[in-house]
Image (tube, rainbow, N blue to C red):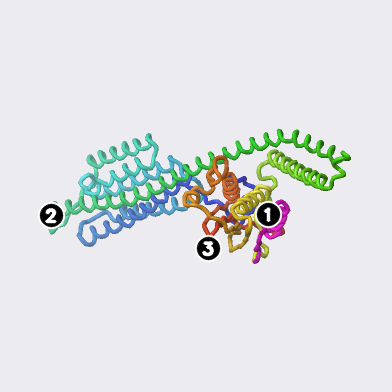
């Protein structure tokens, strides 16, 4: 994951907050709130139908009061969801409140003889899905005690004479409705909860994969810095030897040899500059050099540096329409784009292109070539370490570019062009222009 200071430079959040543990708990609580609204509506309709349609006298005031209390509590729960994370205790209390509301309604409408008493099982199943083990046993114990209490003491229903012959049929119908309601609610709820859990597991698996890739980057960084230290001495020795050669009369008098010595010395200086950059980057605090810069100016500098080191490779550049677009950039992004250009030049040294476009949210930097393109297997593993057509030990450039893009809240994409060749895109979130942050 990226450091917090870089997040502040981008427009909005470049990362989608994955379904971490607390996010999953909040989503489960949100599903429970939706289930409660169904319970509120169901209880209200049932009370009104039984009292006004069937003519069974019910204590309307207390029963409707319980419905109103459940609605108020549900509204409060929905409001609290936006303010803090949901804990196991809070979920337990919510389910205990539901058990208490159901117990109050059953005690006012027949107690243990009410066919809707089977809804207690719904609470136990929900607890088994949502709660920690000890909490599930608390829910089970409370529902068992409530059931026992209703069997011993509850207000019996008084049926009108016209319904007395139909009591058994009404109980059968009520039991069927209770079963159907429990089945439908459990199916809806468990399906959604399972989806949340699968999303959380996928998110955790992605985090583990990212951690493994970050570990690979750290190891490569340590190896690179160690190699840079080791290369310093032989490069210094080569530089001294070349300087000695330049002063030797025999070599200095030969224009061809003198020119080759100058070229060799320039290459040694280039190697020393690369080693210096590696050591500087290795000692640089993470994200320190990252800042919001004008995208067009940044890309022009990257192109100029690359052209200076690849004189024989033509590079077509299109930077139209960037206007005031800004991007969070630094040495890592500069190197990532350079790696993509190097790969394109190896695949197609006669024609390489860089095209930058922007939309309302993203800057897309595309590197194109007219080479042979990617195979299907390569497209499936783009951005993975050490997957390359060049053989073992290669494929680091795309891997590093992919990780740089991800750290900046973007992504790396690779496709084969319809008329031949490959296109690799860095899609990065736009940043706040530097002048707007002052």
First in sequence: mark 1 vs mark 2: 2
Label 1 – label 3 distance at C-alpha = 36 Å
Res. 380 in view? yes
Identify which residue, 30 or 194, lies in the foreground: 194
**Range drawn in magenta:** 293-320
Image side of residue 344 versus residue 34, left or right: right
Q: Considering the numbered disc 3 on the image, is that residue within a helix, a strand or a loop? A: loop
Q: Quadrant of the C terminus?
A: bottom right
Tag 1 secondary structure:
strand
Residues packed near mark 1 inside 10 Å, few (<14), some (14 to 19) or many (20 plus)? many
Name of the residue lying farthest toward the bottom: 321
Mark 3 or 2, nearer chain start: 2
The image position of residue 12, as x and y in percent, is 59, 56
Residue 317 part of the magenta segment:
yes
Mark in the foreground, 3 or 2: 3
Question: Residue 418 or 115: which is nearer the viewer?
Answer: 418
Q: Is residue 302 above or below residue 236?
A: below
Is any part of residue 22 visible from this angle? no
Give the SS element for disc 2: helix
Residue marked by disc 2: 164
* Residue extending farthest left: 165
Q: CA distance from mark 3 to mark 2?
A: 83 Å
Q: Mark 1 — residue?
A: 292
Q: CA distance from mark 1 to mark 2?
A: 80 Å
Query: In x, y percent, where is residue 93?
Result: 40, 42
Q: Residues within 10 Å of mark 3 (few under 14, many from 20)?
A: few
* Residue that mark 3 sits on: 419
Tell me where residue 365 appears, x and y as whole percent.
Answer: 61, 58
Looking at the picture, tell me which residue is in the foreground, 248 or 47: 248
Question: Which quadrant of the structure image shows residue 49?
Answer: bottom left
């Amino acid at each position: 994951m990226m450091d917090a200071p870089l997040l502040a430079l981008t427009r909005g959040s470049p990362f989608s907050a994955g379904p971490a543990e607390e996010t999953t708990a909040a989503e489960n609580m949100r599903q429970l709130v939706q289930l409660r609204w169904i319970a509120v509506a169901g209880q209200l309709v049932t009370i009104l139908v039984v009292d006004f349609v069937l003519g069974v006298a019910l204590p309307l005031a207390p029963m409707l009061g319980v419905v109103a209390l459940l609605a108020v509590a549900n509204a409060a729960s929905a409001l609290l969801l936006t303010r803090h994370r949901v804990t196991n205790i809070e979920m337990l209390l919510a389910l205990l409140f539901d058990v208490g509301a159901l117990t109050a309604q059953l005690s006012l409408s027949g107690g243990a003889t009410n066919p809707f008493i089977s809804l207690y099982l719904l609470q136990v199943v929900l607890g088994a899905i949502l709660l920690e083990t000890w909490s599930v046993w608390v829910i089970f114990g409370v529902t068992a005690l409530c059931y026992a209490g209703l069997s011993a003491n509850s207000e019996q229903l008084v049926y009108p004479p016209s319904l007395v012959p139909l009591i058994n049929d009404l109980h059968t119908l009520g039991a069927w409705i209770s079963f159907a309601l429990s089945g439908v609610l459990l199916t809806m709820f468990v399906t959604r909860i399972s989806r949340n859990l699968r999303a959380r597991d996928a998110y955790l698996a992605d985090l583990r994969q990212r951690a493994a890739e970050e570990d690979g980057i750290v190891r490569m960084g340590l190896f690179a810095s160690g190699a840079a230290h080791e290369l310093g001495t032989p490069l210094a020795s080569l530089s001294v030897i070349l300087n000695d050669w330049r002063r030797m009369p025999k070599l200095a008098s030969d224009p061809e040899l003198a020119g080759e010595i100058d070229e060799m010395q320039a290459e040694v200086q280039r190697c020393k500059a690369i080693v210096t950059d590696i050591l500087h980057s290795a000692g640089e605090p993470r994200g320190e050099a990252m800042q919001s810069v004008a995208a067009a100016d940044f890309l022009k500098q990257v192109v100029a540096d690359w052209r200076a080191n690849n004189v024989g490779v033509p590079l077509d550049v299109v930077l139209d329409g960037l206007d005031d677009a800004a991007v969070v950039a630094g040495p890592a992004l500069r190197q990532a784009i350079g790696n993509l250009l190097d790969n394109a030049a190896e695949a197609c040294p006669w024609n390489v292109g860089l095209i930058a476009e922007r939309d309302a949210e993203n800057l897309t930097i595309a590197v194109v070539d007219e080479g042979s393109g990617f195979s299907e297997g390569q497209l499936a593993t783009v951005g993975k370490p050490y997957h390359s057509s060049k053989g073992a030990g290669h494929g680091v450039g795309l891997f590093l570019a992919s990780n740089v893009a991800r750290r900046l809240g973007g992504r790396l994409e690779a496709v084969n062009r319809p008329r031949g060749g490959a296109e690799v895109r860095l899609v990065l979130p736009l940043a706040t222009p530097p002048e707007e942050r002052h």
